[in-house]
Amino acid sequence: MGSVRIGRYSGMVRAAARLAAVSASAATIAICMAVAPVELNLSVARSGPPGVRATDAVDSEAWLICTSMGSMPDAADWADLDSEVAAGLKAIAARDWRGAIAALSPAALRDPRNADIQNYLGYAHRRLREFEPAFQHYRHALLLNPRHRSAHGHLGEAYLAIGKLAPAQEHLAALESICLIPCEEYDNLKGTIAAYQHWIAR
């Protein structure tokens, strides 16, 4: 089968500063989540990416990342997508992370070179605080497409969620080199890093 037509739906993250401008009629799903490095207990830290330790936690207070999935297709457009990809995106829009993973996983097996699907799977796992599979899917997306802006942005956010500022900044630098003109993925991650730095400086 042909490549799944979902590239135009890959920009899921929006900067928190832009959320006030989001219209409820624009079919944009805005989600705010409290993220605290201390939410990683020892078992999660041990299952995370190399170098993740429970001692990376800096505070017990949560800091806020607001993410959204904009540019959702109109109802008529769902028919243009692979049925399982469409089901996965609908599940993400409904914040049904388990449902999204269940729908997107077989789609990923059928289309193993689709970086967008890997990025969506990483996003769903991250929202469930399942960091190990989230990192695996994000890295797979970047292996397939090293210039995948959304995967760089989401991976940067995932590192911040486990208290890893330096690798998040590396992905910000990657986005700076990829985006020849200003792009939302760079602006979003830059704003999220700034918010994180403000939070840990308190």
Image (tube, helix red, strand yellow):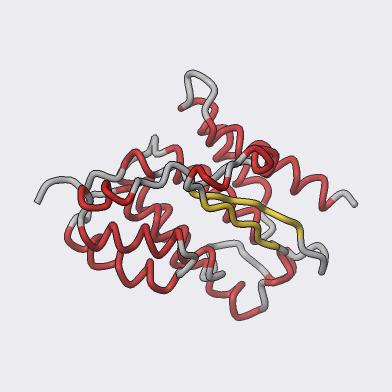
Vertically, is 181 above or below 34?
A: above
Q: Quadrant of residue 71?
A: top left
Q: Residue at x 52, y 63 (%)?
A: 126
Residue 21 position, x and y percent, is: 64, 37
Residue 78 placement (x, y as % from top left) = 27, 52
Q: Residue furthest left?
A: 1
Where residue 14 appears, as percent x and y from the top left, is 57, 42
Please state if 158 lies on the left or on the right of 165 as rendered.
Answer: left
The one nearer the camera, 23 or 87, is 23
Taking the view exactly as shown, the residue that stands out farthest to the front is 25
Specify the quadrant of the image occupied by residue 169. top right
Above-or-below relation of 197 to 172:
below
Residue 64 picture location, percent across and down: 72, 55
Q: Is residue 125 left or right of residue 5?
A: right
Q: How many marks?
A: 0
Q: Nearer the viewer, residue 95 or 127?
A: 95
Residue at point 66%, 45% (across, down):
166
Q: Toward which corner of the image does residue 133 lie, by quadrant? A: bottom left
Residue farthest right in this picture: 202
* Vertical comparison of 154 with 146: above or below: below
Residue depicted at 52% across the width and 45% down the height? 25
